[in-house]
Image (cartoon, helix red, strand yellow):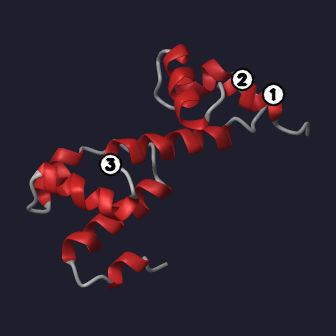
Amino acid sequence: MQSCYRRSRDPALTRIGNLVAEIRSNPWKAYHFKQIAKDHGMSYSHFRLRFRQLAGTGPDAFMLHRRMHSAALQLHNPHKSISQLANELGYENPAYFSRLFKSKIGVSPKAYRDALPLR
């Protein structure tokens, strides 16, 4: 699938657009944005500015939002506890995961799961 960002005449936006698409499809990968900026010949502040222009938010906030969206989808599996899910997603502290989830989704993981239709 070809990204709409690839049609841009601005090579920086094209590269960042490809990165945005990658984060959307693989939010749990470890992204080192300072190194990515350096690899693309940009200062980190310029990279953040261009990323924000394209994605509407900075790279760290965008990645966190995508991770919590992905976590919300995984909460549909009733066979995993929230602690187990948090651990699988790389959060050693389930309470920290719950705070992040609530800050991005608006409700705790338990409240989110409880609101899902029964299967």
Number of other residues with Cα within 10 Å of mark 3, as a class: few under 14, some 14 to 19, many 20 or more:
many
Number of other residues with Cα within 10 Å of mark 1, as a class: few under 14, some 14 to 19, many 20 or more:
few
Q: Report, in whole angstroms, how far the alpha carbon at label 2 lies from the one at label 3.
A: 27 Å
Q: Report, in whole angstroms, how far the alpha carbon at label 3 lies from the one at label 1.
A: 31 Å
| Residue type indicated by callout 1 | Asp
Q: From the top left corner, tell me how far across and down residue 30 is, in percent.
A: 34, 41
Q: Is residue 28 left or right of residue 71?
A: left
| Residue type indicated by callout 3 | Pro
In the rendered image, which residue does mark 2 sit on?
110
Q: Is residue 61 left or right of residue 11?
A: right
| Residue type indicated by callout 2 | Lys
Residue at the image position 46 percent from the left and 28 percent from the top: 90
In the rendered image, which residue does mark 1 sit on?
114
Residue at the image position 41 percent from the left and 54 percent from the top: 23
Are dots 2 and 1 in contact, CB under 8 Å? yes
Residue at the image position 34 percent from the left and 68 percent from the top: 17
Q: From the top left corner, tell me how far across and down residue 3 is, in percent.
A: 43, 76
Q: From the top left corner, tell me how far across and down residue 99 is, in percent.
A: 53, 21
Q: From the top left corner, tell me how far across and down residue 108 is, in percent.
A: 65, 24
In the rendered image, which residue does mark 3 sit on?
59
Q: Report, in whole angstroms, how far the alpha carbon at label 2 lies from the one at label 1.
A: 6 Å
